[in-house]
Amino acid sequence: MTDPIYKTDALIAENIDAYLETHQHKTMLRFITCGSVDDGKSTLIGRLLYDSKMIFEDQLAALEADSKRVGTQGQEIDFALLVDGLAAEREQGITIDVAYRFFATEKRKFIVADTPGHEQYTRNMVTGASTADLAVILIDARKGVLTQTRRHSYLVNLLGIRHIVLAVNKMDLVDYDQATYDRIVADYRAFATSIGIKDFTAIPISGFKGDNITASSENTPWYSGPSLLPYLEAVEVNITADQEQPFRMPVQWVNRPNLDFRGFSGMIASGTVKPGDAVRVLPSGKTSTIARVVAFGGDKDEAVAGESVTLTLADEIDCSRGQVIVASKAPLEVADQFEASVVWMDEHEMVAGRAYWLKIGAQMVSAKVAQPKYEVDVNTQEHLAAKTLDLNSIGVATITTDREIPFAPYAESRDLGGFILIDKITNHTVAAGIIHFSLRRASNIHWQATDIGRDHHAAMKHQKPAVVWLTGLSGSGKSTIGNALEKKLARMNRHTFLLDGDNVRHGLNKDLGFTEADRVENVRRVGEVARLMTDAGLIVVTAFISPFRSERDMVRGMMEPGEFIEVFVDTPLSVAEERDVKGLYAKARSGQLKNFTGIDSPYEAPDNAEIRIDTTAMTADEAADKIIERLIP
Amino acid sequence: MPAKTLTHLQRLEAESIHIMREVVAQADKPVMLYSVGKDSAVMLHLAKKAFYPSPPPFPLLHVDTTWKFQDMYKLRDKAAAEAGMELLVYQNPEAKERGINPFDHGALHTDMWKTEGLKQALDLYGFDAAFGGARRDEEKSRAKERVFSFRSANHRWDPKSQRPELWRLYNARKAKGESMRVFPISNWTELDIWQYIHLEGIEIVPLYFSAPRPTVVRDGLTLMVDDERFPLREGEVPVMRSIRFRTLGCYPLTGAVESEAKTLPEVIQEMLLTTTSERQGRAIDHDQAASMEKKKQEGYF
């Protein structure tokens, strides 16, 4: 059953120099195996190691002894024992961490990330998948596509692995039945398509018996595709595709042996680089050209993605660890707010709004994670409402960094779009994240410097600009108070503008609905408009429910310090519902109106609003006066 | 422009260099543990490449047991000088005073000289990150070792407090007193090491090549009588055998293999055709099944 070509290589004995010459040109494939204990994952890996002669006689002797003592395969060799490392897991009979295995054939060196398949080990699987070029998803032929298969596939796809092998294992236990195999593959194809997996390669195997591992099995004459190992040797993982993208290199370390030399060291994330190339340093935006590609043993003419290099620039410009050197004609986006998928990896749950260290590329910045927009059920891929993320859960959330960072969406670059979060107190790595896109794109466009600035605008109006942000339930009295406030300010010759929720939704935001995501975008746009109006010197009054704390904080962060005044129009739900000025509560209660704040969508009351108005104890006029006291002391 | 496909050795080299630079950029006081073996030789070579034209910005530390092969001491001093690096040699004074040796004290020898010696040296100099040349393919419990292995203030390794390592992002943050052991050649195999030494022309200790050497066979291990401290048992007479070593440590604990391999290609050929694993020559691993895991928890490298 085992093809002898993987056991020994005649060339080794006959001509070692020729052997070394060919083996120096081997490529490398990193893959992950996904499956649960029962799927025979460890057995498969043990089999691959065994068949590629990575198991030596002394290990084999120990394995045979162990197999008889604690093995689960009777008197036969239990390959799983080869790979179940730590003593603790031997006792439990499960693998509980990520283990890396190595084997090589004459064509490739392989690094296998072996991770546990249980739901409580999602973080381990994500870790293993983060560096893999390919995933082998194991299915037990007797059981077919299970919840865990869907979970593994979802994670593999989330981590951007493009090559998937569906290994339908334990074919020996279903008498190598083609119909069983075909049914499983069809089931899987339907599911894979639904989650966006474009392609996969299915192979019927038996890890235990060795069918279709190194060579085609006589037991599956109906299968004409490749065996597993030959497939892994031949699959084009397109490592070179990274070279076709624009040049990017995060600077890890500044090499400064003496005053005459200043080099920038890092691993090239994408593209190629050679002396004379025009480059830009981000986020500063300074430009220069590459002077030298310095290497031990002599300068290089060119370097490509995946190489660790040291570059020197023609000009003395500022560049330090964390900055990214990029092709000047194709710069990266720079932003400080992102939508990202976050995988929580710590025992302590995520705290929305808490500052964590965010490490991306060679850069470490302080960052806050907003309350998740939703959590993803890894088993069903359904979106669930969530206030936080706990160990092994995955959600989509807004990340805000304390300064602008160069980045690329994860789909374009693992190196520039994948990040980790580190707890500032415990220093644990608490989460992994994947950037989808930036939420504030302004910084992607260079600021046009204007001669008449915001101070000038404000001075002409003899006022200090501000944003009075009224937040509260529907019907709480925001618009009424806003209107009263604007009238009083007008009488005081103040230049104001009232942005009202309903009015904005007739124009600027008429494409938005009332889902959580749309509500966030609604508030973001209003925030941007308010910001522009403060630049014009205006006092802006806004009346929006703006139910989520994170978005109100986001808007606060957009404004100049001290210019944002949050006013909590505090009206109990029962009172607002009783008033029901627009008849909306009645509709929501009868189910005609979905996602209505206070009924089936949450309202997060402010913790530290500058002003709180109790409308059950104060008229709109009194409320306006209270706000003016704060606004114009 | 036609794309250039990186070979597995080029990818491994780039990864190791990346790891070393991450440490230097993040640690306050890094050091490279240097044991003079082939893995150390590769690690040192990679460090020279990583920081060129600067010399590697950290010293080499040899935690010495006084029982290494004479050839190892010679190469150690030469290699450090050539790299332009400071060489620190540390010998546990207590082990020295009590005359701890591998012949009379067995496991205590490793514990006192190596495990305790290493902890003492790290504490003495206040190093917060130490490069080591361990590889994941060496031993089963190493397969799960992180690249950045976190150690408590008393140097203990707790499997539960190790941090997940995603992509190329290594979290090197730590509290005062805590430290990291960093393994830049984690993903290299024994064959990768040999091929790289061959390709790059890296100098290694001559003991890796076969030569006639004085030996005795004891408890199944072929031991080399490297100096006059070797206590011969009654009736034991050193015999000249053509031997070499697959791994180097304290000479009384390191078993040789009979061999005619005198060149690197021949050594690699022998390694590929051989049927026993690298660590079999080390007496230390035979104690018990999970012995390495236990030693690691206690702070052994």
Image (cartoon, helix red, strand yellow):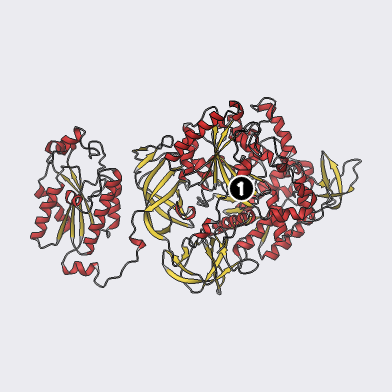
Whole-percent x and y of residue A425? 44, 48
Question: Would residue A456 be visible to someone looking at this image?
Answer: yes
Residue bearing mark 1: A234
Tell me: residue A36, above or below residue A559.
above
Quarter of the N terminus of chain B within the rendering:
bottom right
* Local crowd size for mark 1, using a 10 Å CA cut-off: few (<14), some (14–19), many (≥20): few
Identity of the residue drawn at 18% across and 37% down = A573
Whole-percent x and y of residue A178? 56, 30
Question: Would residue B68 be visible to someone looking at this image?
Answer: no
Which element carries disc 1, helix, strand or loop? helix
Identity of the residue drawn at 66% across and 49% down = A107
At label 1, the amino acid type is Ala
Tell me: residue A130, above or below residue A245.
above
Tell me: residue A411, above or below residue A319.
above
State which chain disc 1 sits on.
A
In the foreground, A408 or A242: A242
